[in-house]
Amino acid sequence: MASTWRHDEELGRGYLLVSQSHGNGRVWRWEVGGGPIAIGRSLHLEASGCRSNFYLPCLDPRSMEPAKSDLLQAGSGAIAIDFYQGEGDSYLEGALILAEWGEGRIIRMEESNGARTPLVIQVPDVCSRETREEDEEGTNANLGSTWTVTRRLNQPRSMLYTPYGDLLVADTLNTCGKAAIYRLSQAVHVDALDSLSASRKAHAWNETQHGHPVDVFYANNLVAIGAMAMDPSWLSMYVTAKTTEGKVVLLKIPIVAEDDEEENAEEEESIADVSTGAMDQRAQIVMDMTDVLGISEPGPLVVSEKGHVFMAVPDGVSVLSVSQKGLIFTCHVVATLPTPRLPTSLTLGDDKFLYIFANDSMFRIRTREGPVTVPTNLVVGKKADKK
């Protein structure tokens, strides 16, 4: 289960979207407002993860028997909002981005014609790394360099748009026990499919058709990734992850390279020889949560506009205050919000409610802080240029 907040400029308010992986998947909408009667829950999207049977077998809605898709989890997973496709200035407004587990891809729902534009299908395979060798005639110029074969997306559970237009995708590979964060560069500029007919044909694609590169952003000794959340500085993000040593950690990873990259060119070159991800050497461990919070698996988190980290723990949600001096982080547990069940997804709405999901239940708690306010004018190539 994954969730996100979406703002609607026409309505003048926002609502919650919840993605479910059961069966063929569904996206639910939950909102309050619109008059004296609370709207509550409504179905936003049916068959949100499996529609075509090209990749995984979809559930037959006419049959009451359990389908293979239930075992293969062919529903929908991670969910996000492409702010660049919105009409207003809110980072929480725009096109719906969805991980279709049953189709093995990530798509953007085009509001103009209802088409599903594939954004990511194949990604670099961190389970399989090979080395090319140059023959005597120098046919292969990549002597001794490391390259990565590709694979189909598995089951992305978290996605995040950077203010600069890139899409970050966290995926776990059960086949080799590794996890990675992938980056689709300038995802906001991927051209939309122009019709529903083209969208139906795209179900049969086995690789991404646009020219925007997908690379490994971070994959340093990870076996699982819980979630990603933007830091109020807009320059980095928090990530919950489990390492190969069995530690569950809170990471802080830059989302852009530092300005002195050219000055450290030689150092960067040496790092690239041993690194599988662009930010492997730049990430910092904020907290080892295994002992401090009693966490055995990485889970969801959200960050408030004032920098407080809301972290799922076995007995609820812990609120962390994080400070940094140089390379040293100091974390304090400000409060713990108890919940009847283990949280599986967290979302902080711009209505200043913290929404907590646990299997088939939803809870919400009023907070004093809203979500991180992210600018929408940092993308190279202005919206006006497209009109």
Image (spheres, rainbow, N blue to C red):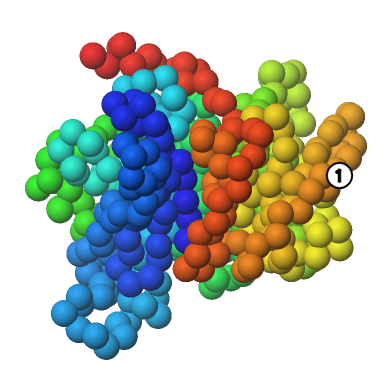
355 left or right of 35 in image: right
Q: Is residue 318 left or right of residue 142?
A: right
- Crowd around label 1: few <14 · some 14–19 · many ≥20 (10 Å): few
Asked if residue 232 is positioned above or below residue 355 in the image, the reply reads: above
- Most extreme residue toward the left is 197
Q: Residue at 23% across / 36% down in the picture?
A: 111
Q: What is the x, y in percent for residue 119?
A: 35, 44
Instruction: Say which element carries label 1.
Output: strand
Q: Is residue 249 visible?
A: yes
Check the image and report above or below for 281 versus 265.
Answer: below
Residue depicted at x 15% and y 53%: 200
Furthest residue to the front? 36
Q: Which residue is more in the foreground, 219 or 386?
A: 386
The x and y percentages for residue 60 are 20, 77
Foreground residue, 366 or 278? 366
The answer to whether residue 120 is left or right of residue 251 is left
Viewer-nearest residue: 21 or 353: 353
Name which quarter of the figure residue 57 lies in. bottom left
In the picture shown, does residue 88 fall above or below 321?
above
Q: Residue furthest bottom?
A: 65
Q: Quadrant of residue 286?
A: top right
Residue 58 at x, y percent in the picture: 25, 72
Q: Is residue 128 visible?
A: no
Q: Residue at x 73, y 19 (%)?
A: 260
Locate the C terminus and report the quarter of the image it occupies: top left
Dot 1 corresponds to which residue?
332
**Which amino acid, mark 1?**
His
Measured as percent of width and height from the top left, residue 264 is found at 75, 24
